[in-house]
Amino acid sequence: MAYKITDACINCGACEPECPVQSISEGDTKYVIDADTCIDCAACADVCPVSACEQV
């Protein structure tokens, strides 16, 4: 299972440098996770200040 970033994202960028496989990138209104490359490590969820990273 991959993670996704919900609309609760405040676009702070805390998650992007934590991803060990660079699956996270800045989108138009929030950060996004590429489900094809996400390894389900939860590093993004661990650092998100608003709990916007959820397992799909």
Image: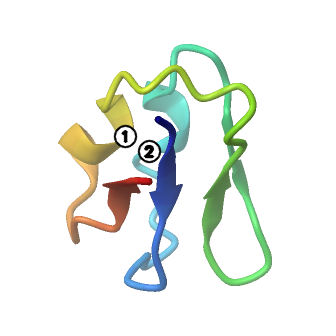
Please give the residue where the numbered disc 1 appears in the rendered image. Answer: 44
Q: Position of residue 22 (x, y in %)?
A: 67, 25
Please say if 12 is above or below 46. Answer: below
Query: Residue at point 47% right, 35% down?
Result: 1
Residue at the image position 51 percent from the left and 57 percent from the top? 4
Which three-letter amino acid code belongs to the residue tagged 1? Cys
On screen, residue 33 versus residue 54, left or right, reads: right
Asked if 44 appears above or below 25 in the picture, the reply is above
Left or right of 8, for residue 50: left
Give the residue drawn at x 20%, y 39%.
46
Which labelled disc corresponds to residue 6? Answer: none
Indicate whether 21 appears above or below 38.
Answer: above
Q: Can you say whether 17 is above or below 27 in the image?
A: above
For marks 2 and 1, give the CA distance: 5 Å
Where disc 1 sits, the SS reads: helix
Front-most of residues 52 and 18:
52
Q: Nearer the viewer, residue 40 or 16?
A: 40
Q: Residues within 10 Å of mark 1 (few under 14, many from 20)?
A: many
Element type at mark 2: loop
In the image, residue 23 lies at what x, y percent? 67, 33
Would you say the residues marked 2 and 1 are in contact, meaning their CB atoms lie under 8 Å apart? yes
* Residue depicted at x 43% and y 28%: 18
First in residue order: circle 2 vs circle 1: 2
Q: Amino acid at mark 2?
A: Cys
Residue at numbered disc 2: 15
Image spot of residue 47 (x, y percent): 24, 44
Snapshot colouring: rainbow
In the picture, residue 34 is in which quadrant?
top right
